[in-house]
Structures are given as structure tokens and as C-alpha cells.
């Protein structure tokens, strides 16, 4: 059965370019309820840990540097079928391939600096949510 929570980050490019408000509006109008949220910045150690699954990929160093380059907004979102529906709302990894109207089509600059993160499975949504939030920060 599909779970009802996913984890997202508004990445440093979208924060720097002033898109926090517009992206939160897309999240709200997409039917997601925000159950946890913080404005924070990842150290390069924390970014490396978060993306450890990509350690062998050629873009890992670039990804860690980018994700620790400035503040982010981290959030846990709730909706039926949250993981899949949020992946649909954000669009393909590469904004050039993202469907029109998706968050990445609207706000991403490149395949690396692609505005938002969205968990790819219920299991990862839970792991990633716990990475950023204590139980007392989730409502
Ligand atoms: P997604 O975030 O859509 O699940 P991946 O899990 O494949 O995509 O990759 C994680 C993140 O790594 C991407 O969101 C993007 O920021 C970065 N990334 C992926 N592919 C590339 C690439 N070819 N070059 C640079 N950065 C990349």
C-alpha cells in the first residue's frame, strides 16, 4: 500500500532565485499538507551523508558542493500516494525533460541545480524525514 508522506527540499538554487513562496504555493495547491518544515543549511558532511547512495556517481562531488552552498527549505509533506504524486508534481530530474507546469520545468536551472528534491520511495521518505526532523518537530 502506498504511504501518505514524502520528504522534500527546496534546493539552494531555488532559494537563491527567490522561488520559496512560489514552490510552497505549488505544494499547497497540489493538495499536500506540510507536517514539518525548516529553513536550514546542510554542512558538506551532512549533504554527503544525505546523498551517500550516489557516492559512486560522477556528479557526487558537485552535488554535495551544490547542496551545501546555501540555505534550503526541508519539509515533510502528507497526501494520499504522496511519493508518486509529488514526483509527478516536481517533474523529471532534468528540467529540459520535465513536463510543462511541473516545479522543475518552472524553476530549475539545470539537471544538477534542479530546484527541489522529492523522495523516490516510501522507505526513503521515512529515512530522509528522520534525517532532518525529530519526532517533536512533526505535526
Ligand atoms: P532525482 O532527484 O530526480 O531523484 P537522482 O536521484 O537521479 O534524481 O539524482 C539526485 C540528484 O543528483 C538530482 O536531483 C540532481 O540534483 C543531481 N544529479 C542527477 N543527475 C545529475 C547529472 N547528470 N549531473 C549533475 N547532477 C545530477
Image (tube, rainbow, N blue to C red):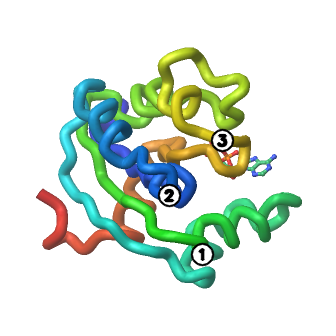
What distance separates the C-alpha of mark 3 from that of mark 1? 24 Å
Going 48% across and 44% down the picture, which residue do you hit? 118
For the residues bearing labels 3 and 1, Cβ distance under 8 angstroms: no
Left or right for 57, reference 8: right
Left or right for 22, reference 33: right
- The quadrant holding residue 108 is top right
What is the x, y in percent for residue 134? Answer: 25, 74
Q: Secondary structure at mark 1?
A: helix
**Which residue in the protein does label 2 denote?**
16
Picture quarter with the C terminus = bottom left
Q: Secondary structure at mark 2?
A: helix
Classify 10 Å Cα crowding around label 3: few (below 14), some (14-19), many (20 and above).
some
Q: Secondary structure at mark 3?
A: loop
Tell us which disc is closer to us: 3 or 1.
3
**Which residue in the protein does label 3 denote?**
109
Picture quarter with the N terminus = top left
- The quadrant holding residue 61 is bottom right
Q: In the rendered structure, which disc, 1 or 2, sits on the residue that comes first in sequence?
A: 2
What is the x, y in percent for residue 36? Answer: 22, 58
**Which residue in the protein does label 1 denote?**
49
Outermost residue toward the right in this view: 58
- The quadrant holding residue 100 is top right
What distance separates the C-alpha of mark 2 from that of mark 3? 12 Å
Amino acid at each position: 500500500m502506498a504511504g501518505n508522506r514524502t520528504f522534500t527540499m527546496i534546493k539552494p538554487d531555488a532559494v537563491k532565485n527567490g522561488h520559496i513562496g512560489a514552490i510552497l504555493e505549488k505544494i499547497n495547491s497540489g493538495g499536500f499538507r506540510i507536517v514539518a518544515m525548516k529553513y536550514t543549511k546542510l554542512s558538506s558532511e551532512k549533504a554527503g551523508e544525505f546523498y551517500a547512495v550516489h557516492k559512486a556517481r560522477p556528479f557526487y562531488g558537485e552535488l554535495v558542493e551544490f547542496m551545501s552552498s546555501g540555505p534550503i527549505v526541508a519539509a515533510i509533506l502528507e497526501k494520499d500516494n504522496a511519493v508518486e504524486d509529488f514526483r509527478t508534481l516536481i517533474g523529471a530530474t532534468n528540467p529540459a525533460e520535465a513536463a510543462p507546469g511541473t516545479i522543475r520545468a518552472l524553476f530549475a536551472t539545470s539537471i544538477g541545480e534542479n530546484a527541489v528534491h522529492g523522495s523516490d520511495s516510501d522507505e526513503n521518505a521515512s529515512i530522509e524525514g528522520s534525517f532532518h526532523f525529530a519526532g517533536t518537530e512533526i505535526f
